[in-house]
Image (cartoon, coloured by chain):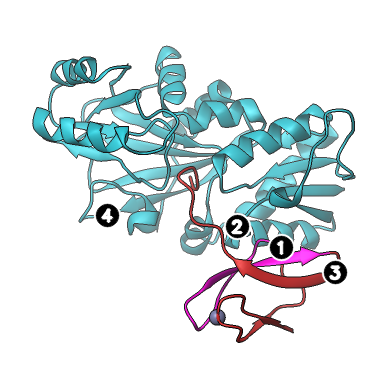
Chain colours: A red, B cyan
Amino acid sequence: MVVLKCPVCGGDVTVEDDALPGELVEHECGAQLEVVKNGDKLSLKLAEQVGEDWGE
Amino acid sequence: MKVGIAYDLPRWEEKNIIQEAKNEGHQVIPFYSKQGIFYSDSNIDIEADLFIQRNVSHSRAVMTSFLIESQGIPIVNDYVTLIKSENKAFTTFILSRADIKTPRTAVSMEKDMALSSASTLGYPVVIKPIEGSWGRMIAKAQDEDSLRSFMEYQEFTSMYYRSIYYIQEFVKKPDRDIRIFAIGDDAPVGIYRVNPKNWRTNTALGAKAEPLAIDAELRELALKVKDKIGGFFLGIDVFEDKEKGYVIDEVNGVPEFKNTVRVTGFNVSKYLITKLMEWYKK
Ligand SMILES: [Zn+2]
């Protein structure tokens, strides 16, 4: 487990070590976040909005 | 074997495919599309023997399949299959011209023509965005007035095909439809999607999945669809029409299968990987 900062409220967010980039995490502040990976370093950013061309 | 997975949003399906490929002893190389850059004069640095296409965004799926194919790595599904399956007009016309039953459908480029096509088909009709998903923006119009409103909604979206109208007869089906999966040379599993409250039976809209026994007719139909649309792994939506029998509603080139695995216990990912290895070795 790794503890990251929520880019919206600044609070702590716990993420699995083997999280994939793009993985969605919902924070208790209500923010939908996605995992970003730079080299081996994980961080979080605000998740992309659901697109019109998403889904089956 | 080195199996690449092209993805943007890792859902249950993508994680399950990764896990099952590892269980089968393969090396998995996740390729996060949003962080990829493709240059025209060089190859992306990925040593995969083959790829599985799993982008949730249609445009990213078509584009990454194309770019990966263009550097000589096989990917399922390939971009031509994705173009044929994500575009409902292409799917319907390709299938119906190949004598595979679909709901009777009219495509027109202008609103008055679309209204005229609806009178010919007979109300109620269904209007669908040509490229859409999860049942969004699909509407049943009881009369000309409501069809006109739905066309106006479509016109004000930002969809690429917003000024092309896809109008379809309303199939009087039971309160369910069928989702069947074509995987390699077989159609091993399927479900009913039951929704007594909504004629749209997408599980994204709350339909309940129930297991389905695949009969010979359904299996043959699924393989015929795959033969015409192409690809290796398709989710095929089938209606049961009282008079016509099985008709093909839609084909999905990056199918979701979480509910299918949940209610049938069939390991879709493992089956897909096994079939892919058989195919690759040939
Ligand atoms: Zn937060």
Q: Crowdedness of circle 3 by 10 Å Cα count: few (<14), some, many (20+)?
A: few
CA separation in Å, label 4 and label 2: 23 Å
Residue linked to disc 1: A21
The picture quadrant for ligand 1 comes to: bottom right
Q: Crowdedness of circle 2 by 10 Å Cα count: few (<14), some, many (20+)?
A: some
From the viewer's perspective, is the residue at label 3 or at label 4 nearer? 3
Residue linked to disc 4: B195
From the viewer's perspective, is the residue at label 2 or at label 1 nearer? 1
Q: Amino acid at mark 2?
A: Glu
Are labels 3 and 4 on one chain? no
Part of the protein shown in magenta: A22-38
B216 or B54: which is nearer to us?
A: B54
**Residue at left offset 17%, top offset 30%:** B148
Q: Amino acid at mark 1?
A: Pro
CA separation in Å, label 1 and label 3: 11 Å
Quarter occupied by residue A44: bottom right
Residue linked to disc 3: A40
**Mark 3 close to ligand 1, CB under 8 Å:** no
| Residue contact at pointers 1 and 3, CB within 8 angstroms | no
Q: Is residue B227 above or below residue B215?
A: above
Q: Chain of mark 1?
A: A
CA separation in Å, label 1 and label 4: 35 Å
Q: Amino acid at mark 3?
A: Asp
Q: Crowdedness of circle 1 by 10 Å Cα count: few (<14), some, many (20+)?
A: many
Quarter occupied by residue B62: top right
B99 or B106: which is nearer to us?
A: B106
- x%, y% of residue B195? 27, 54
Q: Is residue B24 above or below residue B231?
A: below
From the viewer's perspective, is the residue at label 1 or at label 4 nearer? 1
- SS at badge 3: loop
**Residue at left offset 51%, top offset 83%:** A28
